[in-house]
Image (cartoon, rainbow, N blue to C red):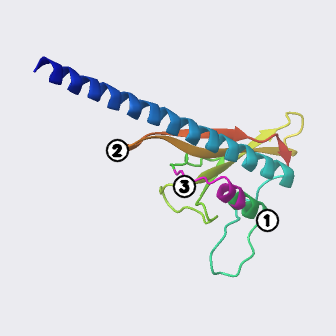
Amino acid sequence: MKESIGGTQLFVIVVTLVLLFTAIMAFTVNHSNAFAVKDQVVSIIESAGGFDMSAEIVEGSGITPDETLTQIVEALADGSYRQTGRCPASDGKITVEAYQRNGAKVIGNNRAAFCIARIPSYTGEDENIKRYYYQVILFYSLDIPLVNELFNFKAIGETKPLYN
C-alpha cells in the first residue's frame, strides 16, 4: 500500500513539472513573438514618418486605407500575432487608437490586437514646432494548458520623435 501512494505522489509531481515547463515555453514564445512584431510596427511607423490616426480599414467599403496601416496589418499576419488586450484611454494630450488584427478600429472598451498612441513632444524653444512620437502597444499572455489565459502583459515600444 505504501508503494502505491508513493507512485501517485510521484505521478502528480511529474505532471506538475510538465505543466510548469509547458507554461514557461508558451510564455517565452508569446513574449518573443510580441516583441518581434512590435519592433516591426515601430519601424514601419518610423519609415513612414508618422501614422494617420484617422486611418481605418473598413472591409467591403472600397475605401483605400492608409498604406502604413496596411503594412502594419501585414506585419501582424506575417508574425502570426493573435493576442488581444485592453488599450489605455485617451486623455487631452495623448491620442490612443485601438485596432483589430484586420485594421478596423475598436469601438468602446473591447479587446484590441494593438494600440497606437500619438504623444506630443515640444522642442522647448518654439511651442509652434511640434514633434510627435508614437507609442505602440501589443499584448502577450501566459497561457497554461487547461487553465488558458492566466496573465496579460504589454509589449510597449516608442518611435523616435517625428515632425508633423
In the image, is 145 to the left or to the right of 41?
left
Q: Which residue is mark 1?
A: 67
- Mark 1 secondary-structure assignment: helix
Which labelled disc corresponds to residue 146?
2
Q: Is residue 164 visible?
A: no
In the image, is 127 to the left or to the right of 150?
right
In the image, is 105 to the left or to the right of 126?
left
Tell me where the magenta segment starts and ends, as one range: 74-84
Q: Which residue is mark 3?
A: 112
- Mark 2 secondary-structure assignment: loop
Q: Residue at x 57, y 54 (%)?
A: 113
- Circle 2 residues within 10 Å: few <14, some 14–19, many ≥20: few
- Mark 3 secondary-structure assignment: loop
Which comes sooner in the sequence, label 2 or label 3?
Answer: 3
Give the x, y percent position of residue 78: 69, 57
Quadrant assignment, res 147: top left
